Amino acid sequence: MAHIVCPLVSAADRARLEAIVADRNRAQKHVARARIILGSADRLPVAEVARRAGVGRPAVWRWQRRFAEAGVEGLLREASRKPGRAPLAEATVRQVVALTCAEPPGEVSHWTGRAMAKTTGISLRSVQRIWQAHKLQPHRIRTFKRSNDPDFAGKLEDIVGLYMAPPKHAIVLSVDEKSQIQALDRTQPGLPLKPGKAGTMTHDYKRHGTTTLFAALNVLDGAVISRCMQRHRHQEFIRFLNAVERAVPAGKVIHAILDNYAAHKHPRVLAWLGRHRRWVFHFTPTSGSWLNAVETFFSALTRRRIRRGRFHSIVDLQATIDRYIAEHNHDPRPFTWTKPADQILTNLNRLNASVH
């Protein structure tokens, strides 16, 4: 004989269950559960209820029991699973955070996950989860250098203004040189990248000399004017300025952003500037080379081409740099500065206040 269970369904519950079944936008799992209870209330055998709902008999018994315990609302929510482990006490979390932000005991400079786990008596994975949740990375450190330039604010506002609101009928160039680029050749070939294996490169190398890259990044369109030279004295800098002068269309005012390298302020460079009236030099604050946009281009060049390269001579290195810049200029992107000067000054003032 088929087993029959008849749950007690009030008129209000029946009306609600029938509405769930009739609702075309309702999730099908909710419809099936409502049909189970309605069929059971109509004293249908379990097998018939399961057939009409499209489920197995264990599911019928489970949802009959859930309805008896929690009513219609119990059919509309999923059963909460028991946690695999008890959550850490809030005091333990606060202890880990406080210890991480403090000096560790002994002759070490920072905490490791295993040292913290041993000290607090929790697992390494728990320490890692706490650090991740609170964005703590004790193994990392960021270096900085404060500028002592008395006109820091004025120079900052001047350069950021050129980036964010460049003057009309003018070109803004970020100019600098990357010196001592080494032409390094490896003593033997490395192995290429393969699935599951990183590419290899020998640690030892042969030196073939160095070159200096002079570059001017056009902030408006991202194109780069460049020259590779053997040295980086004021004589080479003037030669590069002449090359830029020839490359920029006549009639355009040129605003050049420069750092405080001695060659940029040499008397002969200043005399050259006096003879070329359309040029205006804007110097970054001392220890403020991060304001010079061309530094981001130098960084990309180093990461993407030079660091892993093999160069058999200085000529080979210079030709590689020229090809990289030509490829960059084929599809340049404008340089975009997003943070206003007043916001930078506010952040620096806050940092100075916290240091003192």
Image: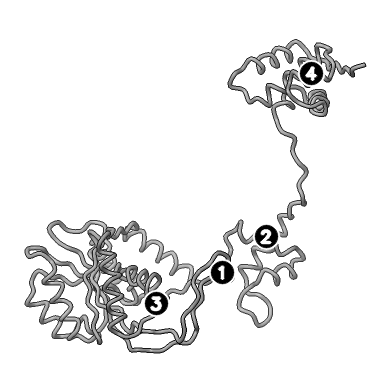
SS for callout 2: helix
Count of all numbered marks drawn on residues in the image = 4
Corner quadrant of residue 222: bottom left
> Left or right: 99 with respect to 271?
right
Residue 298, percent across and down? 33, 72
Q: Which mark is residue 94?
A: 2
Q: Amino acid at mark 3?
A: Gly
Residue 292, percent across and down? 30, 70
Mark 3–mark 2 Cα distance, whole angstroms, equals 48 Å
Say which label, 2 or 4, has the lower sequence index.
4
Q: Amino acid at mark 4?
A: Val
Q: Residues within 10 Å of mark 2 (few under 14, many from 20)?
A: few
Say which label, 2 or 1, has the lower sequence index.
2
The residue lying at 88 percent from left, 17 percent from top is: 4
Question: Badge 3 is on which residue?
Answer: 309
Residue 77, percent across and down? 70, 30
Mark 3–mark 4 Cα distance, whole angstroms, equals 72 Å
Residue 161 visible in this rendered orientation of the protein: no
Q: Nearer the viewer, residue 189 or 231?
A: 189
The residue lying at 8 percent from left, 74 percent from top is: 276
Say which label, 3 or 4, has the lower sequence index.
4
Say which label, 3 or 2, has the lower sequence index.
2
Q: Residues within 10 Å of mark 4 (few under 14, many from 20)?
A: many
Residue 74, percent across and down? 74, 27
